[in-house]
Image (cartoon, rainbow, N blue to C red):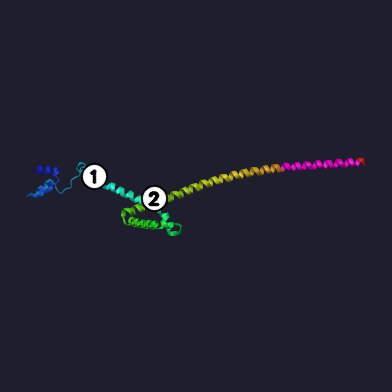
Amino acid sequence: MSWGLHRADRDAPSSCTALLLIQDSKQLVQGAGCHRPHAIEPGLIRPGRQRQARAASAALLLLLLLLLLLLLLLLLLCPLLVLLLASPALVPAPLQPLMLFLLLLVLVALLALVLTPLGLLLLLLLLLLLLVLVLLLLLLVVVVARRLLVVEVVARQRLLYVLRLLLEWLAVLRHLRLQRLRQNALSLRLQQQRLRGQQRRQE
C-alpha cells in the first residue's frame, strides 16, 4: 500500500489531499511524504502558463517601447514649449492653443511617468543616457581640441620656419645690395680721381 501511495503521490497532484482523508493519515502522510516539496520538472509546466508568461512579457516590452517613444516625443517638444513659455509672441496666434494643449499633455505625461515605477525607471535610464551623451560630447570636444592644438602648434612651427627662411633671404639680398652699393661707390671714386688727374694734366 505504501508503494501504491508513493505512485499515487507521484502521478496525481491531488494524492496528498486523498491521503489526508484516511483514518491513519499521520502514518500514511509520513510514509508518502506529502508535505515535502516536490521538484518541479520542466515537463510539468503547463503550456497555458507559458503562453500567459509570453503574453505578459510582450505586453511589458510594448509598454516599455511606448514609454520610450513618449519620452522621445517629450524631448522633441521641449524646445517648442520653452519657446512658447519664453516668448509667446514668436508663436503664431493660431498655434498657441495647440501649443498650450501640448504643454498640458507633456505635464500630464511627466506626472504619469513620475508616478509610475516603470516610468520613473525609464526616466532615470533616459537621464543616465543623456549624462552619458554629454560625457561623450565633452570627450569628443577634448579630443578635437587636442588635435586642433597639435595642428596649431605644427602650423606655427611651419610658419616660423617659413618666416625664418624669408628673413634669411632678405638678409642675403641686403648683403648683396650693400656689396653693390660699395662697388658703385668705389667705381665713382675711381672715376672722380681719373677726372681730377685729367684736369690737372690739361692745366
Query: What is the x, y in percent for residue 142?
Result: 48, 49
Q: Is residue 197 left or right of residue 178?
A: right
From the image, give the main secondary structure of the stretch colored magenta: helix
Q: Amino acid at mark 2?
A: Leu
Q: Give the class, few, some or many, for how many residues have Cα within 10 Å of label 2's Cα (few <14, many ≥20).
A: few
Picture residue at 67% right of the left edge, 42% below the top: 169
Q: Which residue is mark 1?
A: 51
Q: Quadrant of the N terminus?
A: top left
Q: Amino acid at mark 1?
A: Arg
**CB atoms of marks 1 and 2 within 8 Å:** no
SS for callout 1: helix
- Which stretch is magenta? 175-200
Q: Give the class, few, some or many, for how many residues have Cα within 10 Å of label 1's Cα (few <14, many ≥20).
A: few
What distance separates the C-alpha of mark 1 from that of mark 2?
33 Å
* Nearest to the observer: residue 87 or residue 163: 87
Which is in the foreground here, disc 1 or disc 2? 1
Q: Is residue 104 left or right of residue 193?
A: left
Q: Which residue is mark 2?
A: 129
Q: Height in image: 200 above or below 93?
A: above
Query: What is the x, y in percent for residue 52?
Result: 24, 46
- Asked which quadrant contains residue 89, the reply is bottom left
Query: What is the x, y in percent for residue 138?
Result: 46, 50
Picture residue at 60% right of the left edge, 44% below the top: 159
Q: Is residue 160 left or right of residue 68?
A: right
